[in-house]
Amino acid sequence: MKLNKNYLRLEESYLFSTVAHKVSAFAAEHPDRKILRMGIGDVTLPLAPAVISAMHAAVTEMGDKSTFRGYGPEQGYDFLRESIRAYYGRRGVSLDADEIFISDGAKSDLGNILDIFDTDNTVLVPDPVYPVYVDTNVMAGRKILFSDANASNAFLPMPDEKVEADIIYLCSPNNPTGAAYSVEQLKAWVEYARKRGAVILYDAAYECFVTEKGLARSIFEVEGAKECAIEFCSFSKTAGFTGTRCGYTVVPKALQSEGISCNKLWLRRQTTKFNGVPYIVQRGAAAVFTEEGEKQIAENLSVYRRNAKRISDCLDSLNIWYTGGKNSPYVWFRCPGYDDSWQFFDKLLEGAGIVGTPGCGFGKNGQGYFRLTAFASEETTQEAMERLKEFLG
Ligand code: MLT
């Protein structure tokens, strides 16, 4: 047998695993130190009561012969697809339920979607970038180009007509930089993709953090996007499903290449390789869109928003340049006094007991930058910002 040697071209370990190893080693050496974790973007608030009671009811159904369910539809139950369709509808985006595919999260689908595209396509990703976009394409042996995101474009790169890309990744609000595209800016990307016959893989996992008018929550707010884009979204950050696992991918029927429908290919792929998200989880996810669920989730999101403000206020007071924090749970800042992000990571951990994510782990343009998340508890975030002020002040 022959192994896929493309794997040998990957970094030895996934960014967040490397961070976790370093933190475990530090904790083992300093058992008396209190470590404040603001590295991986993992939520800390529990699932909303409306979600929990919907899941309990579903568990009861599964234990009763008359309501028990076996295999579900691979692409998701109608009740959840309809709820998502209505959620988009309330934001002025009209979709058909069969354009929505339920998955176990955006990360899986962002990787899996590549199954329907030839390995011959050239991929364009921003730098810095969520490592999954790069690694999954390295695994497949695709050619990858990078578009520079940096302080001069506020970490929001725009299309360059000279670049010949077929698959374009955009994430807004962005992980890791927290920068968010306006609908106007996305129009330029849609125009570029349509001109080239390219596809945009649009990661909208953080859309629920957008509050500012004019910023996009979905690429489908742009006219013509259904002919060139696939959108990935998740209940992880919206409703605390990082451990529960549920997301959705929108593959518009208007998206075609050489007369072949992407929606059809994706349905074929999913029905073959995926057996759907558990019924109990899908019932919980549908409760997110009930009146009660929406209210409870908004309360949780406001906690994370307050945390993001605590971080940005702290950086303002220290006069440190940053992006994000306003329409995003991530704050991305220039490491003060350090050119190397890993060096700053070590110093911050040793000196203040704070864990963040080194910007260079997201690409070369992340060197000298650092990411903090707003997903920790309010107490942790408050304490971390006091320590940060003392450490850098
Ligand atoms: C992150 O910290 O970037 C996220 O947790 C990654 C993810 O959602 O997979």
Image (spheres, helix red, strand yellow):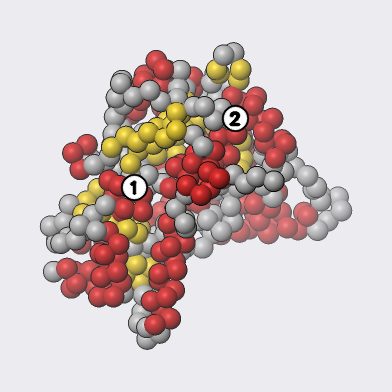
Instruction: Name the amino acid, label 2.
Output: Ile
Q: Is residue 331 visible?
A: no
- Picture coordinates of residue 189, whole percent (x, y): 35, 25
The structure residue drawn at horizontal position 24% and vertical position 42%, both measured from the top left corner, is 150
Helix, strand or loop status at disc 2? helix
The structure residue drawn at horizontal position 33% and vertical position 63%, both measured from the top left corner, is 356
- Picture coordinates of residue 130, whole percent (x, y): 41, 46
Left/right placement of residue 102 relative to residue 67 reads left
Left/right placement of residue 359 relative to residue 40 reads left
* In this view, 189 is above or below 61: above
Quarter of the figure with residue 265:
top right
The residue positioned farthest toward the top in the image shown: 259
The structure residue drawn at horizontal position 13% and vertical position 69%, both measured from the top left corner, is 393
- Picture coordinates of residue 259, whole percent (x, y): 59, 13
Query: In the rendered image, which residue does mark 1 sit on?
Result: 363
Quarter of the figure with residue 273:
top right
How packed is label 2: few (under 14 Cα within 10 Å), some, or many (20 or more)? some
> For this rendering, which residue is in front, 45 or 287?
45
2 and 1 marks in contact (CB < 8 Å)? no
> For this rendering, which residue is in front, 27 or 61?
27
The structure residue drawn at horizontal position 45% and vertical position 28%, both measured from the top left corner, is 122
Helix, strand or loop status at disc 1? loop
> For this rendering, which residue is in front, 102 or 200?
200
Left/right placement of residue 365 relative to residue 58 reads left
Instruction: Name the amino acid, label 1.
Output: Gly
Sequence-earlier tag: 2 or 1:
2
* In this view, 174 is above or below 58: above
> For this rendering, which residue is in front, 173 or 157?
157
Q: Is residue 344 visible?
A: yes
Quarter of the figure with residue 353:
bottom left
- Picture coordinates of residue 314, whole percent (x, y): 20, 62
Query: In the rendered image, which residue does mark 2 sit on?
Result: 116
